Amino acid sequence: MPLSNEQYFGVRPLSEAINILPSTPTIIRESGLFVPEYLSTTYVDITMKNNELTLVQSQPRGGAGQPTKTRKTSGKTFQIPHYPMNDGVFADEVQNLRAFGSENVATPVMDKVNDKAADMKADLEYTREHAQLGALQGVVVDADNTVIYDFNKEFGVTRDVYEFKLSSDTARIGTTTDKMLRQLMLNLNGDISKGFICFASPEFMDAYTDHPSIRELYARFKETSDQYRDTNPNMTFNHRGVQFVTYTHKFGSEVDIKAGEAHIAPLGTRKTTKEYFAPANYNATVNTKALAYYLSREKKKMDKGWDLEAQTNSLSILLRLKAAATLRMS
């Protein structure tokens, strides 16, 4: 069976293959909010200073002669979550497979592996979307609603909540928005930003865009919205440098956006929003620079096929927790 061929089906070629497979559209990931960084370790050391989380230089796993560093009392170590998926290719599935007009069976077997890998990658991308929705709120929650990390608690930060009186026709919503943005800009502590993005529940979005002080602006935006949708096809409204996105998906999770609420964070930063990737837990990947996804195979019992494992090892985090906030309608 061609899967025994390391040239085509070793960890390296399989991992390269899964990383170039088409991505499944997900709203937060597509927005580019969290900037990827690829590590050679399975953890990050983070310290707090002036309400700003800073990445501390770590040492690679297994590196010879690495000095022991004294950690700062305000520093914390966070293991990067490990998300594996499993599938398999049975011998019967590839029996007699051969590309039309060819004697080479490797190509159709690779097609079968790609089909399996695409399904697993879609689930892993869905998992990353869920993790980023939580990170937007300062927490990382597992699929079973177990809290992996609550960064607000870890660093003693109180989440800011801005009240928008959308039920009052006389409320000055633009002024409320401006005050919030000025404070969020200050909380960037010198980091650059290309604006903000706000993921809103349908209830919040409807009330915001239908408010008397916003309604006419929203109507004009819809007339010229095509020029903005090239930047973000999921955008519902662009106002005062904020991309408002209606977020309708529900994971059945503690981090789902509640009705009447929204969450805002800065876009295009250099130091504030990160997604850290760690290497896979394979011999071939120890102390190597991480990839977003990995794919490996192992022979099944009695030589009846091959087990496949896809995995991602990622941690999304706001390094300036006060640069993001919750919006709540009243």
Image (tube, grey):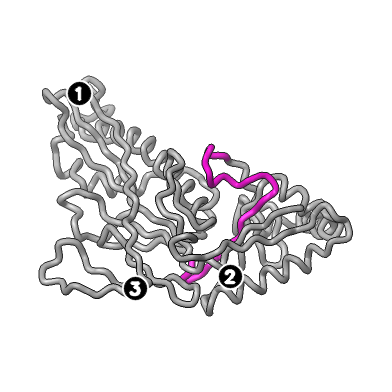
Q: Residue at x 88, y 60 (%)?
A: 170
Could you tell whether 265 is left or right of 109 in the image?
right
| Residue 321: x %, y % from top left | 52, 65
Quadrant that contains the N terminus: top left
| Cα distance in 3D space between marks 2 and 1 | 52 Å
Q: Residue at x 60, y 59 (%)?
A: 231
Instruction: Please give the range of residues in magenta.
Output: 250-272
| Residue 141: x %, y % from top left | 45, 47
Residue 165 drawn above or below residue 178: above
Instruction: For mark 1, give the secondary structure.
Output: helix
- SS majority, magenta: loop
Along the viewing direction, whichever of 37 and 262 lies nearer the viewer: 262
Could you tell whether 123 is left or right of 85 in the image?
right
Q: Earlier in the sequence, mark 2 or mark 1?
A: 1
Task: Give the labeled residue for mark 1.
Answer: 91
Instruction: For mark 3, give the secondary structure.
Output: loop
| Residue 72: x %, y % from top left | 32, 75
| Cα distance in 3D space between marks 3 and 1 | 55 Å
Residue type pointed to by label 1 = Ala
Residue 200 drawn above or below residue 325: above
Would you say residue 126 is visible in this rendering? yes
Task: Give the labeled residue for mark 2.
Answer: 194
Instruction: For mark 2, give the secondary structure.
Output: loop
Q: Earlier in the sequence, mark 3 or mark 1?
A: 3
Frontmost of labels 2 and 1 is 2
Residue 261 sits inside the magenta stretch: yes
Dot label at residue 306: none
Could you tell whether 244 is left or right of 97 in the image?
right
Task: Give the labeled residue for mark 3.
Answer: 73
Q: Residues within 10 Å of mark 3 (few under 14, many from 20)?
A: few
Q: Residues within 10 Å of mark 2 (few under 14, many from 20)?
A: few
Frontmost of labels 3 and 2 is 3
